[in-house]
Amino acid sequence: MGKRSRSSGTGTTRTTRALATGLTAVIIGAGVACGSGDQNSGGSQEANGAVTLTWSMWASGTEDRNAWQKVADEVHAENPKIRIKLDTSPFTDYFTKLGTRLAGGSAPCIVSMQSLRTGGYTDGMLPLGDLIAKNKLDIGSFNQSIIEGLASGGKQYALPYDFGSLVVTYNKDMFKAAGIPEPKVGWSMAEFEAAAKKLTRNGKYGFVAYPVDLYMFPMLLSRTGAEPVGEDGKLALTGKTMGTAFDWYSGLSAKERVAPKVPGVDNTFPDTQFLNGNAAMSVNGPWSVLSLKGQAKFGVGLATIPAGPDGTKTFSAGSGFGISSSCKYPDQAFQAIRTMTSAKVLGELGAEGRAFPARTAVQDQWYKNAFPGAQEVIDAANKSATPFKTTNNWDQVTKLLAQYGVQAFNGQESGESALEQVQQQAGTG
């Protein structure tokens, strides 16, 4: 997913969203081949058969990198003849470099992938079906929505390490100061709007809105049922339902003034506004929640996406690890990924708040470190979630949404016009 907090699902840095995902956000950085072997293989092999494999992962700083290095070390501890060379890059650079490396056959052996972007990079990735069967890996122990999210065209391209359904995070202190009851599971859009208006005072705002996938589309989905991609798999931003929903969402800033103006394209904006106490509510994923809790100087609460006419709805997304088609050591790479997505490793990541585990059996490790009420909200969100479906050119779509959406949020352009320009430039995907 996966900018903000520790990552996801969705590919996020410590204070900004991946999607992620933090989602989130999760992304493939440009790997640098290691060792003395073929520089296009993403790895090298020694005379005794031991291999060193490059693994590309996003990281926002030393803390993130150290956490992922621990995962790499786990691989070597379990498989002494496999060493992992960790290569990291910022979320913002990740996909820009990815296409070039995959197309040129110089990608790392192990690549990190976000569910929203899987379909756009499968030409340079190895389908995992044969390796899953060969190693008799039971993928039924993973949450099936993220298994589907990391597949494309009926083929599995990555094994998941995290997933999550989008929820609302809120500032408990601001709610208390405004005399507003904290939101309950299943609260309505009317309750959300009333709270946002009452919380907007003294230079502070009730909500922070931002025009890009994981921030925006769960709110639009719940309010009107609008989805950015049609049943035919094509981009669908210009329909009446989507236009109505986007006008409402951008209007929270441009018209209602319950959300701050967006100064420009900045994926860190929502989390920065929330953590600084400038906005009382924001959309986020479970991959970021424990990190936000640790950073915030106020009480953080969780709520479901507010319910529209057809009840509460949200999207789910996540991330995982795949193998580049140029990797010369796919068997060893698969063994590494098997360890990286094991119950042991995912339980540790969950306990640290770095990922909401994709393996259902160890999700309790995340809940143990969450705050009261978190499990009720996450469970409810998961029940109401739809896997976030995207087009193969989704990275381009998100950039265009941010570019033209900012203008709509600031009242410089109509919401309908902004979406038309995104659709026209991105095509159907």
Image: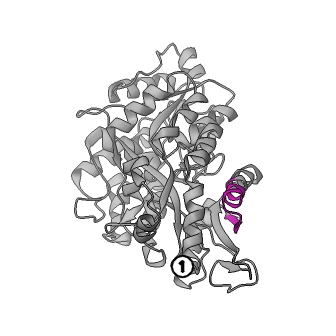
Q: In this rendered view, identify the residue nearer to me: 225 or 249.
A: 225
355 vs 166, left or right, is right
Location of the C terminus by quadrant is bottom left
**Residue 3 placed where, x, y %?**
60, 52
Image-based side of 7 in relation to 396, left or right: right
As drawn, 149 above or below 366: below
Does 84 lie within the magenta span? yes
Amino acid at circle 1: Leu
- Depth check: give the residue in front, 24 or 179: 24
Q: Is residue 59 left or right of residue 343?
A: right
The total of numbered circles placed on residues is 1
Q: Residue at x 38, y 38 (%)?
A: 382
Residue 55 or residue 15, whichever sits in front: 55
Queried whether the magenta region covers residue 106, the answer comes back as no
The stretch of residues the image draws in magenta is 71-88
Q: Residues within 10 Å of mark 1 (few under 14, many from 20)?
A: many
Where residue 83 appears, as percent x and y from the top left, is: 71, 67
**The quadrant where residue 52 appears:** bottom right
Question: Can you tell which quarter of the image residue 44 is in?
Answer: bottom right
Vertical position of residue 203 compared to residue 124: above or below: above
- Position of residue 269 relative to residue 112, above or below, is above
Residue ID at (63%, 62%): 57
Residue placed most toward the observer, 291 or 351: 351
Place of residue 291 in the rendered image (x, y in percent of width and height, measured from the top left): 64, 38
Q: Residue at x 36, y 56 (%)?
A: 148
The residue where tag 1 is placed is 102
Q: Quadrant of residue 378?
A: top left
Q: In x, y percent, where is residue 301?
A: 54, 26
SS for dot 1? helix
